[in-house]
Structure formats: C-alpha cells, structure tokens
Amino acid sequence: MMKRSTLVLLKTLTWIGCLVPITWLVYSYVNNSLGPDQTAEIASVTGLTAIWLLAATLAVSPIRSLSPRLSWLIKFRRLLGLFMFFYATVHMLTWLGLYAGFDLNTIETDIEKRRFIIMGVTTYLLVLPLAATSTTWAIRKLGGKNWNRLHMLIYLAAITAVVHYWWKVKTGVISPAPLTLVIVLLLGVRPILAWKRRRKVRAAVALGTASKV
C-alpha cells in the first residue's frame, strides 16, 4: 500500500503538471508573447491539453488491469478528468468569448457553417455531465451501476474529440495522428481486457465447483 506522504507528493506533482499549460498561457498573454494570433494560440493549447488529459484519464483503467501494482492510479483519475474538463471549458469559452464575442447570431452561424465546431460542442456536452457527477455524493445519489453507465460517455467523447481535432486542421495536416493512435489503442484494449477478466472469473467459478465435487 502506498504511503500517504508519497500519494500527497504525487498528487502535488500532478497538480503542478496540469497547471503548467494555463500558467504558461497567462504568463505569455501578460507579456504579449503568444504570437500574432493570440486567440488561436489559446484555443490550440487549451484544446490539445484537454484532449491529452482525456487520453490520460482513459489510460488509468487499462494500466491498472495490466499491472495490479499500479492500482493506486485510480486515485488520480478524477483529478485528471476534472482538469480535462477545466481546459475543455476554457477552450469552449475561447470560442464563445474571443471568437464569437458571446454574440448569439455569430455562434449560430459558426455552428451551422463549421462542422468542427458542431463536433467540439458535442464533445463538451458529453463531458459536462461527467464533471457534474464526479463527486462521491453524485455516485451515492445515482447508484454505482447508473453512475458507471453515465460515465461510459467518456468513450464517445474521446471519439468526438478526435473527430473535432481532425476536422479543425487543414486537409493534409497529420498532427492529430499520434493522439488518434493513442485513443484508438485505449479504446481498443478495453474489450480485450474485459474478455480476459470474464475468462478468469469463469475459470475461478469452474475451479470452485470442481473442488466441491
């Protein structure tokens, strides 16, 4: 079992790591060093940080399944997920405020004409209930099974986030490829690990039954 002091240290480092992108953005904005298109840079950094944190959140369960010694990683999943939502919210507000100026007509026009915005909004709406129900109180209120069903939306959010990224970049640009590969692997390994767990359970049940005969 991990020592409390070690856990506190790792969580502190996680907080620091997750705050680096927003700290850099604020510092660069204050010092006017974000480049010629500051709004685009803010949108890029917050969007990429959000989707990589989504991938990190998805990675926790497979890693724990493959290496039981790393079961303590579960204590970081909610933290990573909430930071993902934080950056997704800043990313969304960048569009609503800095690009659209909170003008409803501009927002409506953007949604109608730009498919990557449709997919981005969809992704945000998918992760919104996950963040809203991330507390222990929400788990108790919903019940474990219902909470787990609701939080399966993260898989759909991962897919829509990747599509949003691909639709945002210009044709021929392959910068979303590494992230896409990571998401595909994280989603693809889940049914394989679930099948292995079911097989172990069946084997244990069969062994228990045989020992009683």
Image (cartoon, rainbow, N blue to C red):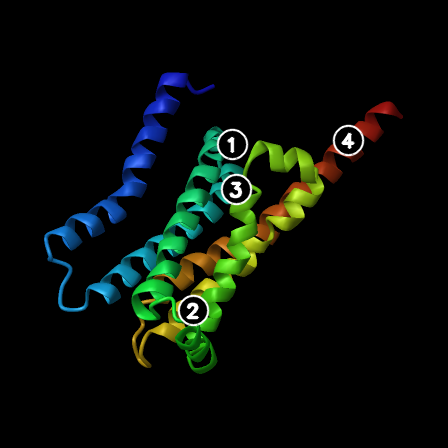
Question: Which numbered disc, 4 or 3, marks the residue that appears first in the sequence?
Answer: 3
Split into 4 quadrants, where in the image is the C terminus?
top right
Q: Is disc 2 surrounded by few (<14), some (14 to 19) or many (20+) residues within 10 Å?
A: many
In this view, the residue in front, 90 or 79, is 90
In the image shown, does 101 or 50 lie closer to the viewer? Answer: 101
Mark 2 or mark 4, earlier in chain: 2
Q: Which residue is mark 2?
A: 164
Element under disc 1? helix
Q: CA distance from mark 1 to mark 3?
A: 10 Å
> In the image, residue 211 lies at what x, y percent?
82, 25
- Tell me the SS state at disc 2: helix
Q: CA distance from mark 2 to mark 4?
A: 48 Å
The reply to whether dot 2 and dot 4 touch (C-beta < 8 Å) is no
Q: Position of residue 159 (x, y in %)?
A: 50, 63
Give the CA separation, mark 4 to mark 3. Answer: 27 Å
Which residue type carries mark 2? His
Q: Nearer the viewer, mark 4 or mark 1?
A: 1
Q: Which mark is residue 68?
A: 1
Could you tell me if residue 31 is visible in this image?
yes
Q: Foreground mark, 3 or 2?
A: 2
> Is residue 41 shown above or below 67?
below
Q: CA distance from mark 2 to mark 1?
A: 34 Å
Callout 1 touching callout 3 (CB < 8 Å): no
**Residue at numbered disc 4:** 207
Q: Is tag 2's residue or tag 1's residue first in the polypeptide sequence? A: 1
